[in-house]
Image (cartoon, helix red, strand yellow):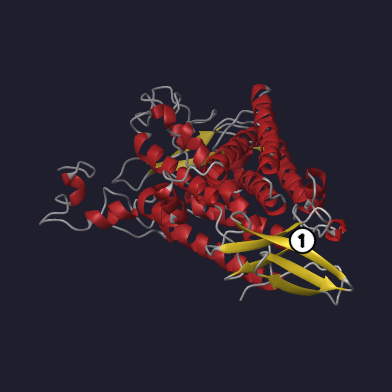
Amino acid sequence: MGSYQLIREKKDARLRWDPQQGDVIVEGEGKNLSLSPRIEVVTSDTTSNSNDLELSFQKSPTSPLSTLPKSSGDHGGPHFRKSKSGGSARLLSLDIFRGITVALMIFVEYAGGIYPAINHSPWDGITLADFVMPFFLFIVGVSLALAYKNMPCRLTATGKAIHRALKLLILGLFLQGGYFHGIKNLTYGVDVERIRWMGILQRIAISFLLAAMCEIWLKGDNKVNSGQSLLKRYHQQWAMAIMVTALYLSLFYGLYVPDWEYQMPMDISSSEAKIFTVKCGVRGDSGPACNAVGMIDRKILGIQHLYARAIYGRSKECSVNSPNYGPLPLDAPSWCQAPFDPEGLLSSLMAIVTCFIGLHYGHIIVHFKDHKVRIQQWLVPSSCLVLLGVTCDCLGMHANKVLYSFSYMCITAGSAGFLFTAVYMMVDVWGYRHWTTILKWMGTNALLIYILVSCNILPVLLQGFYWRRPENNILTMIGVGPKK
């Protein structure tokens, strides 16, 4: 059933439709007011898929209703709203942005090995592939602001958020914990003593849960009519984001990292292991060997539960084929073969901040209806974030995806804001939607595509069908699988 809100000047006023004039007449106490109806499609309030028609009444120039205050979050005149399912039409640019991110993920997944310049950076620096994760986190925050715009019950919303986060965590453990052995191996299963606890979906789940809890419980009720009032309404969330950032920086630069050891098997068939010692004894180091991010993961998660093929294995110090993986140089440092998780515990703190920034952009959609105002409110923080990130990088706080450094967070979150603004202008303002069909589908099915393509589930399923020998499968025929 549709919900109607009528703003009236007097309690005993009556509405009467005049079919000849095409107006709605408000009668009461000897005053008749003429209101001309205007129907407009609202496409930017929430993420519901249903169509929503908002019937707004345009005041006549002499109407006394012009003295009435505007409703909270609305910049138009008095209105009432009708919705078939209680929501409004889906913001198309939201799906397009997510679709672009999925397309970018697929592109760098398969083209990164051919063009190393777009693959993940071996350590410091940002490449095209390094924008994928922050873009996903950013759009999670935007979606949360729209999803929790109207909550009938905070406890119910909290329960649903926890349930969804748990599903993402379990799915991440199943897909990225080591259960599947890749497209060159038909076996499956994982030793629980060596399962990888963290991963991409686990990081998204943690960021989603904390941002959702803040959106449900930490927001004010004051009216929003400017950027300053918007910050005031959500000042508790900004305080949380600042505390999370301060916690990351204090732990990263304040913790003492001692010397540490790890073991590597002598060869594949041998049970004997060689012990490597890594010399550290420093604080605030941002190199691959002695940073606080890796130390916390080794202490809490256990080194056997970290990602075994560390990204710094593609660096010049650790590979003769750098920026690709390859044999170790003769003078390779001792840490080159050590496990390191790119989605670790400490680095996930800054991922949470990216989600908070996405929340702010979503709040702008909720509280400002004018396209120009929205774009201005987006471009200012995007510019500030990129400028701050570049400045920090130049001053020595290098942009690093694996550490999720502060400068990396600022640059990627600001870039996400710029891209989202551009997509919004093209799709929702200028109406260029003919090219968006595929991207929209990819955006609405992002999780499914990620599971099938990026986690190699589809190739693993396809290679399970073979002719006489496992090597004779579809992947081998098209040149993906190994030939023997």
Q: Residues within 10 Å of mark 1 (few under 14, many from 20)?
A: many
Q: Does 340 sit left or right of 482 as displayed? A: right
Q: Position of residue 22 (x, y in %)?
A: 66, 64
Q: Residue at x 36, y 50 (%)?
A: 453
Q: Nearest the camera: 324 or 192? A: 324
Extreme residue toward the front, this view: 20
Q: Is residue 163 visible?
A: yes
Q: Does 81 sit left or right of 135 as displayed? A: right
Q: Nearest the camera: 15 or 313? A: 15
Q: Position of residue 87 (x, y in %)?
A: 60, 65
In the rendered structure, which amino acid carries the disc numbered 1? Pro
Q: Is residue 336 visible?
A: no
Q: Residue at x 27, y 57 (%)?
A: 461
Judge whether 416 appears above or below 58 on screen: above
Q: Position of residue 51 (x, y in %)?
A: 54, 63
The kind of secondary structure element at disc 1 is loop
Q: Residue at x 67, y 34 (%)?
A: 385
Q: Residue at x 31, y 54 (%)?
A: 458
* Residue tagged 1: 78
